[in-house]
Amino acid sequence: MTATTNTDGSGDDALALTDFALDEPPSDLRSTIAESVARIRGGELGSIPALLAIAVLVSVFGAVNPGSFLSAVNLANFLEQASSVIVIAMAVSFALLLGEIDLAAGFTAGVSAAVLATRLQEWPLLPSVLAAALVAIALGLFTGFMVARIGIPSFVVTLANVLLFQGILLLLVREGGSVRIEDPVVKDLVGANLSTTASWVFAIGCVLAYLGLQIRRQRSTHQRRPWSVIGVKVGLLAAGLVTLTLILNGNRAFPNAPAPIQGLPIVIPAVLALVVVLNLLLNRTRFGRHLYAVGGNAEAARRAGIDVMRIRLAAFTICGLLAGIGGAFLASRVNSVDPNTGANDTLLLAVGAAVIGGTSLFGGRGRMMNAVLGGFVLALIPNGLTLVGKRMVPLLGEIDFGSSGVKFICAGAALLLASSVDALSRRQST
Amino acid sequence: MNSTRPVLEVEGINKTFGSVHVLHDVDFSVRRGTVTALIGDNGAGKSTLVKTIAGIHGADSGTVRFDGEPVTITGPKSAAALGIEVVYQDLALCENLDVVQNLFLGREIVSGGLLDEQAMEDAARETLAALGVRTVKSVRQPVASLSGGQRQTVAIARAVLWNSNVVVLDEPTAALGVAQTEQVLALVRRLAEQGLGVVLISHNMNDVLQVADRVAAMYLGRLVADVPVSDATTTEQLVELITSGRSGDLGLTEAAT
């Protein structure tokens, strides 16, 4: 971008009001697409790689194993698998936006889930949930204090936290033990479905809410878009949601099953609600703006009068709370908590999901939607590979694509690819 | 122009860092509608003087008057409350945020608990238009995509967004090419035309002669000259003031050194 001078010879002040005549949003569908292409060329890839990856994975797995991969039961299963990764990825995003990392988010989820499960043995639902949430907040606050106040790099603090929190988790559930969850509400979070009527109400409500939001935006100058663009966006959303609801409202239980399984999985509205609330926090509040500013240039933020330490503390606290919510998703999926809840690859998948979705590891860039899209990619890989199963591959012989080895290699490769894209696009745009 | 009353006057400012006496009885004033160039070699005390005015350093002794009234500047916040803004050389912009977001950083307009983007955008356009800025194509561009001159423009615009009275610019053209330097200097001129007191720290004597109404020269912690720029003022004179603290009958007398 080079500086351009207005060479029009007329008076200096007369032109002032027309100075930003160029500062208009695109006026029709065509120029909107042109603008998007220009932005992508400029290195602002955003979620494009994740969307491409989803398209490629779905078509490859769909082609290899159409019967089981493209079935309604697998779609619902996939969404439930992805949900906990997505929620923990959203948690980690708050650390990533600062340019920091939380390596212990998985164990924060585990500890919070363990508190929830053990409390539910004795207490009713609400106090148990409150206790789990408070513990998650406390763990986040602790990390934030160590990073922001004491000044230890987040990498080191959270590395220590991995051991600390894992120890707490082991003490809570006793080594080798597992705590069952009987509470129907917690069990239903991941696994139960909306009724078919509620599914339709939800789908139509979403489309109407989105339409309303777009119409409201037309009032502001910088967000105004041509109506054709809004039509396309709302149309795409409506088509997607209606298709999804139609598929999932059909009975997907096995033949002879005692009860039909139908409706949208509850994880869809649950995750969506988190995305909406967190988006509002990040994009429409002073705190969100300051969070991006601290992640982009902490010194500039400090000089602008922002309390950088407070922002860091708050971001890690939110990270903790969200990880705790992710823990409830993890626990609800298997209806129990054991020492492995939130362990193993949970954290890696969450960080991977955020980065694959387009959230920068260098701070200041990222959205909640990135965690969702990246979570889809990383949940698609094991889901699809399991269904591919054992196959003969030329030159390599028989390979079990459903094995952990292949899954890890694929997820690792996807993460490396995504961080390369992040690093390269960052170099290009600065 | 010299007859206008100074908006900011400092008198007899002394500042020591440990055993080093950095400012010696410095008298300095800033007038509305006037660009005062502050020149001097590295270590002459320019930055310390500016940081004292901006409230970053406290002075050991001396008085500060604002619009004729004695004031005490206790910190950056009280300086900002008086409408004193400093644009430092490293502009301190957030590259990941756009122009509007940077202009309003830390002072966002909020309505009903949510950011009022429309109000901020309108105010940003207004400020930039009033400054005659036409180099920034869109106020919604991320700063990462701006050139050095455009970034300088944004940083300066941020300093004047809140009815500032005094703006101190620390080497605003140091990192810029010829065309961009011209644009920034024109902007500096326009700030003064809008009635602000402008202090321009610069090592480039051409810039100084081009835009400054007055020149204040510092030499080894003393303010050795505070003179109007006339057609007769030459680069040689200014360089002499910087390097030896005097030039002809300007500057230090023998007794002072």
Image: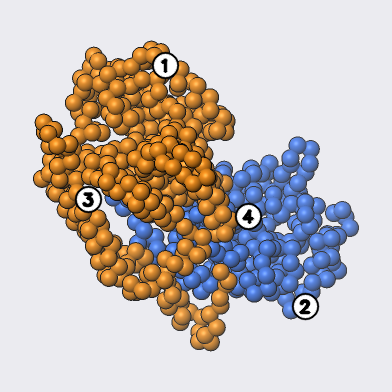
On residue A135, which mark appears? none
Which is in the foreground here, disc 1 or disc 4? 1
Position of residue A90 in the picture relative to residue A163 (left or right): left
The CA distance from mark 2 to mark 3 is 80 Å
* Between discs 3 and 1, the one toward the N terminus: 1
- Which is nearer the eye, A19 or A77? A77
Q: Are marks 3 and 4 on the same chain?
A: no
Residue at 61% across / 64% down in the picture? B148
* Between discs 4 and 2, the one toward the N terminus: 4
How many C-alpha atoms fall within 10 Å of the one at disc 2: few (<14), some, or many (≥20)?
Answer: few
Image position, residue A294 (x, y; %):
50, 45
Q: Is residue A347 above or below residue A33?
A: above
Residue with the mark numbered 4: B90
Q: Secondary structure at mark 4?
A: loop
The chain letter for the residue carrying disc 4 is B
The CA distance from mark 4 to mark 2 is 34 Å
**CB atoms at circles 1 and 4 under 8 Å apart?**
no
Q: Are marks 3 and 1 on the same chain?
A: yes
Residue type pointed to by label 3: Leu
Which is in the foreground here, disc 4 or disc 2? 4
Which is in the foreground here, disc 2 or disc 1? 1
Which is in the foreground here, disc 2 or disc 3? 3
Residue at far right of view? B254
The CA distance from mark 1 to mark 4 is 50 Å
